Image (tube, rainbow, N blue to C red):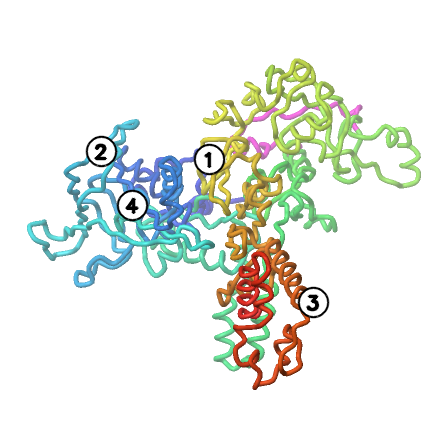
Amino acid sequence: MECAACRKRRHDRNRVLRERGEQEQNLKQPPFDVALSLYAYNIPRYYTIMLRAKDFARVHQRRLRWCVARDVPLHRDDRDLPVDQLDAKRQRWLLMHDQDTAHLASSLPLVPGLPVRLTETVDRGKFLFRGRRGKIYGWAPHPEETSEDVDGILLLDRLPQTVYVEFPGATWVVDDLPPGVHPVPPASRTWVVNKHTKVKARRTGFFLVPDFASTAHMIQGQSLDAASADVVNDNMLEQATEELHVTAYVMLSRAKFLHQLWVMQPFGRQLFARGPPLGPNLLLQKLRGEITPEDAMAKFDEAGEDGKPKKKADPMTLLFSCTACRLGGRRDHEKPPVAFGAYCQADIATHIVAKGAWARCLACQEVAETCRLKARRLSLAEADGITTKAPTRDASNTVQCATCKLDRPKTFFMQSVLAHKARAESRGTTLQCNVCRGVRHCEGCSGWRQLKVFRPGQLRCKACQPLCCANCGQFKAPAMYTEQDRKHYFSHGLKVSCQACKDEGHTARAGQHRGAAGLTTRQCKGCLELCAESSFRNEKGVLQEVCMQCEMITCNACEDSKNRFAFTATNVRNHFSYKRLVVCKECEEKGCSSADPRYYWCMGPCQQPFGHSLFDKAQLQAHRKDNRRLCCKTCDREEKQREKQLKQRIRNSKEVCKCAKQVYATRMHKEVCFLHQRPQNYMWMDKLKASNGGREDSDWLLERMRRGK
């Protein structure tokens, strides 16, 4: 039982937003209309401020203008690119947030009255430091500015000369401007485009961003009138780390009162069940004299081993406790999510976590429903405002299950169990229904199947569920598809074609009925075909305009954009799945690899650039360290062979020095010897010079010996 006061208190404490709940109107009213959205990372923060800036202009019925930062590449190879390739690179640079681009935002929305925040210190004398909040008062357009109207939004081709920002509470005056209004001119900074290759670019923009979102790191120490926080990184059942624990605490403690805070999505209770933070807790224990410094270091090392990232567990494999079974003394009270009616990850929040300490499995829920019906009370669904018709069963055609203690129809039991019912009762053994055995009834074949052969939310098993053909758009039986197509359809959600369409020469990729399978599609601007959204690469939350089959891949060695057929299958997978450095097949033949895609110039006869694998490792390491002479393996082998042949010609000479040593034994001559005093005039050099083309051979051999090989 729960009184009205406790019910109201529990309702007020529920601060988790729902998709279409009563909070939707509350979010459009002050103070939530301009409240900050708090995140743990910068990427969702940056996209939130851009979307809310557009919504601000729409709500206040003001014209929105976008000014875009200007990027100038500083690398020589980037400057030599064609105009279209350079523009494509600049477009990718504009997708980065301000923390990656030296605090200069890629795009700045210009709307009078728009809340903004400084990303860098502008004037220390007027206390205009980083993070100071204000609102746009106006701006001075460029004299040569032209704009383009795109869906009611103006795109400016030039940056304004200055943006005037009004800071509330300021009394100082700048020139003829009103009190508290300060000009913010454009600024230029150099930022690192690629941290691996150290490629840089020069950006010109404004140290301003819309003040609609922030990260937990930026908002520390501040109190807000209202806020909405997202404390979940992956899912509500993710592993609770100390970083997530601290950031969640910072975000949830920024609002002054509970009714001024909204949580964007439900989070798991394990997030705040880790105990106190390790560092402050050990410090207090050390100051109180409870532990020694050696004990503190040992605990830190132990926590570091435990804090290593672990493999993410599938939430559907976790076990949850059924309260009714636990209170009833059953040992198997911990059950998988399917026992509670949650057949997918999204159902865990509503079917298990939302019930709190009163989460019950389906069998216990049926027991409770039976008890309520016998007591002539409303069912649980009717008590919550959902009217459902109670099922009617024939008592003469039912059998009581010994596990869940429910009277179920005979179809819920195996035929072999019912055939030996009398023998089981005489021996004192129990009868168990199929629900307690962990199987499910299929509406297609009318049989009982294991839960793993059902898709989430489907009433038919995979062997009975019809598949949608991407070409003809008809739902056909699984027998009309190959075994590989069925695996692609059920396991990976790929589009498939039936055998009849394949016989006519159609392919699944060119199908026009992909949306009929219940998957979202979009048109690729490369092949102009409808493809599933899963075939488009997601770059920082934005889907690319061309599918992965048509998207050009940039080789990190030659820096040319090529199609996927110019790369190996491993490199294509590493590029799209893991965002690693890749090199094309042509560069791989020249010795480059993903580990080191750079080219090195050979100083031998060929004078050609090659990759690291075509050079000797010792020579390459010496070249990197001391800039020594570097030759490829082919040139090095040819030079050694040439040196061997020339020395053999010298050894065959019968010339003898005055010190009775052969002329080719240069290191064995005495100090008074002519050959020892002036080694550049070796007598055996004359023998080489006398031969055909011997002067070039003698000079080459002398230079090689001077270098010490």
Cα distance in 3D space between marks 4 and 2: 16 Å
Q: Which mark is residue 543?
A: 1
- Say which element carries label 4: strand
> Which is nearer the N-term, disc 4 or disc 3?
4
Is 681 within the magenta? no
Identified by mark 3, the residue type is Asn
**Based on the displayed image, in which of its 4 quarters is residue 668 positioned?**
bottom right
Mark 2 — residue?
62
Residue 621 in percent (x, y) is at 55, 64
**Where residue 248 sits: x, y (%)?**
45, 55
Q: Nearer the viewer, mark 4 or mark 1?
A: 1
Q: Nearer the viewer, residue 130 or 388?
A: 130
Q: Main secondary structure of the magenta part?
A: loop
Q: Which residue, given by chain and number where applicable, does mark 3 sit on?
A: 652
Which numbered mark, 1 or 2, is in the foreground of this view?
1
Closer-to-camera residue (584/259): 584
Q: Which residues are magenta?
A: 374-398
- Near mark 3 (Cα within 10 A), the count class, few <14, some 14-19 or many ≥20, is few
In three-dimensional space, the C-alpha distance between marks 1 and 3, rounded to whole angstroms, equals 74 Å
Label at residue 210: 4
Q: Residue at x 15, y 56 (%)?
A: 170
Q: Earlier in the sequence, mark 3 or mark 2?
A: 2
Do the CB atoms of the residues marked 1 and 3 lie less than 8 Å apart?
no
Judge whether 393 appears above or below 66 on screen: above
SS at badge 2: loop
| Left or right, residue 260 beside residue 519 | left
Looking at numbered disc 1 in the image, what kind of residue is underneath it? Leu
